Amino acid sequence: MNPKEFLLHECENVLATLQDVLRHDYAAGSSKEFYNEFCERLNYLKSLIDPVELTDISALALFANEVSVLSTLVHRIERSHAGEFPWPFTEYLKSLANPLCKEHLVVQDEDEPIIRVYAEGGLFSYQINLENDLSVLNVGRRIFTIVFPRTLRHHVLLHAIFGHEIGHAAWAVPQHKSALKGQVVEPLREAGPLNSTSQAKNWLKQSDAPAAIVELLEAYPDEYSDISPNQLDSWFQEFMCDLFGLVTFGPSFLAAHQTLLLALDPSGCLWGPYHPPYVCRRVMLWRACQHLGWPTFPAGIQDRELRASCEGFVKKYSGEAPGKWEDIFSQEQIAKAVDALRDILTKAGTSCYLMPDDPTLLPLVKMLHGQIPPCGSDLRGSEAPANRSVDFRHILFAGWLVADELSAQATVTGEQSYFLELNKLCEMGLLQQRAIDRYNDHKAGDKH
Amino acid sequence: MTLLSMYKRDDSRTVYRILAEQAVRYFDHPSPGTESKIPLTNLSRLLQRYRYDAFSYDDAPGIREVFKTKGESQGGEYVTTSAKASLEVIPALEAAHARVYQAISREDLVGSLMTLLALLASSTLPDDQDTKQRLAKARLFFETLSEGLKKRNA
Amino acid sequence: MSALVKSSILKHMADGKLVVSPILCARQRGASSIDLRVGNVFLMVRARGLSVVDPARFAHTDDKVGDYEYEQARRQKHERYEAPFGQNFLLHPGMLALVPTLEWIKLPANLQGIVTARSSWAREGLSIATASLIHPGYKGVITLELANLGQIPLSLYPGLRIAQIAFHTLTEDAAAKDMSSRFDMAFEPAEGNKAHGDEAFLPPKVKQP
């Protein structure tokens, strides 16, 4: 079998696997559009492979990669078994990501991506995998794959970390990338210790750097002393994505960010080719909260107890450290970046997080205290129930606020099961909120 | 590294060379219908990237990739990326731009090409002289681009 | 002991003692009951390679929670399916599926709930009457044990009203120690220990095949 024959043979295998997947209950949601998209890609690819000469080595090598991409994708749909990830959360996540990922294309009905979801093992799985149309020829509608960690399936509070991942997704869309680079990243780059690689290297060696940084540099000078231009580019993309997470998910993002990152690097001082030290990211988020006026702006939380709890929360999960080594951006830089980001998001049709007022947040917190899933459900026993529309991100914020209270109690009692229970209550609340919104939208549609 | 992973490649030059060649064929033989959907979609993306200067594909690992423990793989990610490879496409695009559409901006160039591609994709292609000239110019742009991408040091 | 009419149900809810959340519309409340909707999880009971219901598997002190035999016996017979709103689930004739309600229920110490099928569905062969008593003090979703007794498949969608719950007052408040149950704070159907308290009637040890 020559390379061309094998590739055509493998195209048939991929098609057979795709059809095999339909045998099972795997394909809830966007099954049909995925199937159709996939068949179109396969047919297109075969039409490219068929006439190619065996001497056209670069084309054959490229087509091998294309077949491999399709093989991976079909495997993913097989893996997206319904029941391994939280549907209601995923639906909300899609509503944030979809407007951002819309493309301006010649074929107009192809502009929205197909979003698939699957669960992966390992604590490091949170990811939105993007199709890279720069190195892959055979991309029709883009397929984005949201990856949840299998073991954290019910932990919707932690899923706020996806705010960061949506940032990466937006970065892959040309018109957003250009705006994000010019209006969000540039203000961050224009001053401070990460302004250039030489300044960055000096900054690492500053005498006021945390002890963990000093130890790291002493122990592994070859690995850690140098910072390349590419590394700085990646770091700034990460800073941008952190701001993205904060602006889209609100304070829940702070808590998820800290919980996950510090659990894996308690020092907060590790860095790598893609990621800057967590301590710097945390201070940046604190400055961003300052600029946004959170948690008391715009409507303001008037209830004294709730207000104190919100203020304590934002303080705890963002890193107030003005003037310290890790405080690498000025307030003006952050203000510019955050304002530009909010502007970009609003223009794209993705809603930024707005702090809730008392009547929105208090009932959610109260429901959680009463072990009732938090949502806009009218519990008053009214003759005609007046269920409210509640932004799913407020449900997450309420969940985190209560988690914080219970965490303090758990420190005393040693009882840790509260966190899973709270997550499940919030997950149920998201499901119920979707039902409320769906019902109310339908009713409103009927009236019109 | 597995035996076969060494063959994974990012060949943006070939990707865009094939796309440009298809565009030329498409200008010669417009065929509205589903078979042209994927190449047209990717041509749109190529042009959008040129317009917004968004070529380098920056790898987007998961938020906690930095802490990956020993032995953990990339989670089956199939995308191999290299900013360098995709950046090689830019000189060829700029050369085609300069040769065929000297005076106009990137934004106007992309707007104009997208309009013509949409026109080709529709079944109502005007038969007037002006349209024919514009189509011939656009065809020349893609031909120049594909030639440029064939050269090793474009 | 008497059944509550709508006004009494509403009063209990207004007092915060009774919770049924969410109630999407006024129509969901009957003269003396509240309709319950299908949630989005379906546990289909399927005969698989090692499926068996044998209380003896739960009875042995050396087969504790977490032990292979104990857990395997519980998990070998359900296939889980999760459907978003708008997607159906087919309940085939003769099939049994465990389905949580969309609603979250909290009962006070002086009320018990009785769950039955809505008559329109019962007439199509849908049975929900297998475990209908909800004890006072309960909080969580209610697991509906759905069986299709007809001859044609039933298409069920998350959000559909298929069951109803009526409330009965008790002669006095149930004692706190009697109200706790392992099904409390249930988010999904869970299996009960069918041996608990009846070990005397079960063989001393069953070896796994």
Image: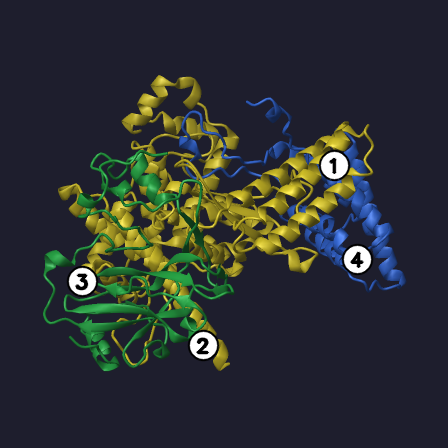
Chain colours: A yellow, B blue, C green
Which residue in the protein does label 2 denote?
Answer: A443
User: Residue at 49% of width from left, 60% of height from top?
Assistant: C90
Q: Is the C-beta separation of discs 1 and 3 under 8 Å? A: no
Which quadrant would residue A150 be assigned to in this image? Answer: top left
Residue type pointed to by label 3: Gly
A299 or B107: which is nearer to us?
Answer: A299
On screen, A286 above or below B81?
below
Give SS at disc 2: helix
**What whole-number distance in Å separates the C-alpha atoms at marks 4 and 1?**
26 Å
Q: Which residue is mark 1?
A: A8
Q: Mark 2 to mark 1: distance in Å?
A: 52 Å
Q: Which residue is mark 4?
A: B32
Chain for disc number 1: A
Q: Which mark is residue C137?
A: 3
Secondary element at tag 3: loop
- Identify the chain of the residue marked 4, using the numbered disc in the image: B
- Crowding at label 1, few (<14), some or many (≥20) Cα neighbours within 10 Å? many
